[in-house]
Image: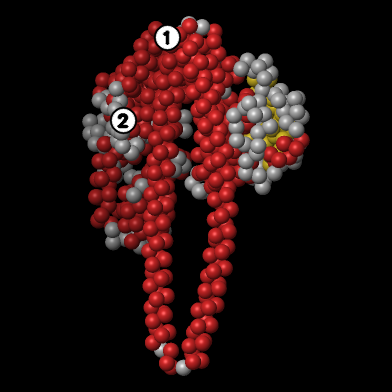
């Protein structure tokens, strides 16, 4: 399958999800209301509560406990199987979810919703023909209570699409489009229909639908306040619609227009990321303020207790000199102990402040250098613009782009470093296919590689699996590729490949033919005690924060890091990660 088709099929599959809607809200409200008659069973009542709270694991646990009670009211079994089926479905344990739904009797008042869930399960498990039998039955019944007809039509279309039954898929997509009123879902529908025609190479029909999706996505209004889940969906549709148009224009070799769409796509991605980061920072600042206020309250309480103790000591001093001396000795020991604790905390705080000051000093220096360079470059750019020196203008624009990209990378690394220091970063080590991740990260650097005329090659084995956290591994790769580009001369090369030289580990190697480094610099970069490193090449923007971030991320992934380099002869950055044997 070509790159074009692979991209659009991924967009289509993105919308294949059993989404929360008004019909399902009504179903949840009614089933919880009907279940109240069984709340005398404590475990059943807790299962109902956690279902309402959408805490699926707790729902599974308490519904199982209720089923294990031999003295239970058997008439509530259908509710318990329904609870378990829904929770397992939400946790994507599809086969077991289907088993639970199949235990429900056909006389159950919510049987239509049961069959809709089973249809969705089979669609997710790619058992399309089986899913079609359930969806067709639901589309033909007269009483469609709790059944979302539009969702059924969309899922029927998807099933026929994946079975390459394009005529039937087209029919159901068009039927869904007639009933759909929600703008977000309409964008989805237009993209799905466009993909259908695109798969059949009917570009003249498909492209107008992509254009419709794009035009409608532009009209989606997003709140200026805190991002809601609905706002995130709108941002995602805007991103996908713009990216689709960029790929279409690239396929038509209309590269200028494609660049406009791709910049729009990147703007949406950056805007969403920035708003998420701003919200995260604001939330953390609020937490810090609350914690500081609580410390003040605690301190006042301690001070009040001390004053009260002093009054009691003075009051009872007449009881006897020995008792007074004993109490005095006790408080003296406590004070010494407290002072030691405070001294230790102060020492730790001083070290953290020194680290922070050094970090801010270097980062602010490089940001100032970047902004100053951009300012100077813009002044020259304006002079050349006045003289219409197009060749100089192009060079200056490339230079400005490089400066901005470097500053953006610095800020991104600074944020990730801060998240790691405050332990806010989500981290989940799972089995990852190494080639897919390297290919995905490298794709975003193609424009920079072309701009610097660098030859890029990714020969990572497609059979290599490693145990790692996906997002942190992407951050590691972005920093290593970014450094390789930054320190490479035009017409050089960058290679990413894998090797197996350490038992139980897979080596991921990023090699460049760039400036290289001295052995002293190499050893300093590998030293865990160094926070930031002085640049060996003063004409290149960078703080060394990226390498420190890389080392921290690799350590959290239970991996190893090494560098091979020689001044003037390029560099190899070697990341060793625990390998996973491919199942089957």
Q: Quadrant of residue 534?
A: top right
Residue at the location (75% across, 37% down)? 520
Q: Which residue is mark 1?
A: 203
Judging depth in this view, the residue of 348 and 581 nearest the camera is 348
Element marked by disc 1 = helix
Judging depth in this view, the residue of 129 and 457 nearest the camera is 457
Q: Which quadrant is the N terminus positioned in?
A: top right
Q: Is residue 314 above or below residue 84?
A: below
N-terminal-most mark, 1 or 2: 1
Packing grade of label 1 (10 A; few <14, some 14-19, many >=20) is: some
Q: Position of residue 390 (x, y in %)?
A: 51, 7
Q: Which quadrant is the C terminus positioned in?
A: top right
Q: Position of residue 4 (x, y in %)?
A: 50, 16
Residue at the location (43% across, 15% down)? 260
Residue at the location (60% across, 19% down)? 449
Which dot marks residue 222? 2
Q: Is residue 244 visible?
A: no
Q: Quadrant of residue 147?
A: top left
Give the spatial CA distance, label 1 vs label 2: 31 Å
Q: Give the mark toward the camera: 1 or 2.
A: 2
Q: Position of residue 483 (x, y in %)?
A: 63, 29
């Amino acid at each position: 399958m070509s790159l074009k088709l692979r991209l659009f099929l991924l967009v289509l599959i993105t919308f294949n999800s059993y989404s929360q809607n008004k019909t399902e809200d009504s179903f949840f409200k009614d089933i919880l209301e009907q279940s109240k008659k069984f709340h005398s069973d404590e475990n059943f009542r807790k299962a109902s509560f956690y279902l309402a709270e959408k805490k699926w694991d707790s729902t599974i646990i308490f519904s199982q406990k209720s089923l294990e009670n031999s003295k239970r009211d058997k008439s509530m079994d259908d509710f318990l199987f329904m609870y378990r089926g829904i929770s397992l479905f939400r946790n994507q344990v599809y086969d077991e979810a289907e088993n639970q739904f199949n235990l429900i009797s056909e006389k159950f008042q919510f049987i239509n919703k049961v069959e809709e869930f089973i249809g969705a399960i089979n669609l997710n498990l790619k058992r399309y023909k089986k899913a079609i039998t359930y969806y067709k039955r639901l589309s033909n019944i007269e009483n469609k209570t709790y059944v979302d007809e539009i969702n059924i039509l969309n899922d029927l279309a998807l099933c026929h699409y994946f079975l390459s039954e394009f005529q039937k898929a087209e029919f159901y997509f068009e039927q869904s489009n007639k009933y759909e009123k929600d703008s977000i879902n309409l964008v989805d529908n237009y993209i799905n229909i466009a993909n259908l025609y695109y798969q059949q190479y009917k570009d003249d029909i498909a492209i107008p639908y992509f254009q419709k999706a794009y035009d409608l996505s532009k009209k989606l209004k997003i709140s200026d306040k805190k991002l809601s889940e609905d706002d995130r969906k709108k941002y995602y549709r805007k991103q996908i619609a713009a990216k689709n148009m960029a790929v279409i224009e690239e396929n038509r070799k209309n590269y200028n227009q494609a660049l406009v769409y791709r910049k729009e796509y990147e703007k949406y991605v950056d805007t969403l990321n920035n708003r998420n980061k701003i919200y995260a920072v604001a939330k953390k600042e609020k937490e810090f303020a609350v914690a500081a206020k609580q410390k003040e309250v605690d301190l006042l309480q301690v001070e009040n207790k001390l004053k009260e103790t002093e009054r009691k000591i003075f009051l009872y001093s007449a009881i006897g000199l020995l008792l007074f001396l004993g109490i005095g000795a006790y408080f003296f020991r406590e004070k010494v102990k407290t002072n030691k604790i405070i001294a230790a905390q102060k020492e730790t705080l001083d070290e953290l402040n020194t680290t922070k000051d050094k970090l801010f000093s270097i980062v602010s220096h490089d940001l100032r250098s970047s902004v100053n360079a951009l300012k100077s470059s813009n002044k020259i750019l304006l002079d050349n613009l006045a003289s219409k020196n197009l060749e100089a203008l192009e060079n200056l624009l490339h230079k400005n782009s490089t400066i901005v990209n470097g500053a953006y990378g610095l800020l991104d690394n600074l944020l990730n470093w801060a998240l790691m220091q405050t332990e806010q970063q989500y981290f989940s080590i799972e089995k990852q296919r190494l080639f897919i991740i390297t290919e995905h990260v490298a794709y975003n650097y193609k424009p920079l590689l072309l701009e610097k005329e660098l030859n890029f090659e990714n020969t990572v084995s497609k059979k290599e699996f490693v145990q790692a956290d996906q997002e942190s591994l992407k951050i590691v790769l972005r920093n290593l590729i970014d450094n390789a580009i930054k320190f490479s001369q035009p017409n050089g090369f960058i290679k990413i490949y894998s090797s197996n030289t350490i038992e139980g580990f897979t080596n991921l190697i990023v090699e460049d033919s760039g400036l290289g480094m001295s052995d002293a610099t190499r050893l300093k970069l590998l030293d865990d005690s160094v926070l930031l490193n002085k640049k060996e090449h003063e004409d290149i923007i960078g703080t060394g924060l990226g390498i420190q971030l890389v080392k921290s991320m690799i350590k959290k992934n239970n991996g190893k890091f090494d560098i091979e380099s020689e001044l003037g002869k390029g560099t190899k950055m070697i990341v060793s990660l625990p390998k996973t044997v491919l199942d089957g």
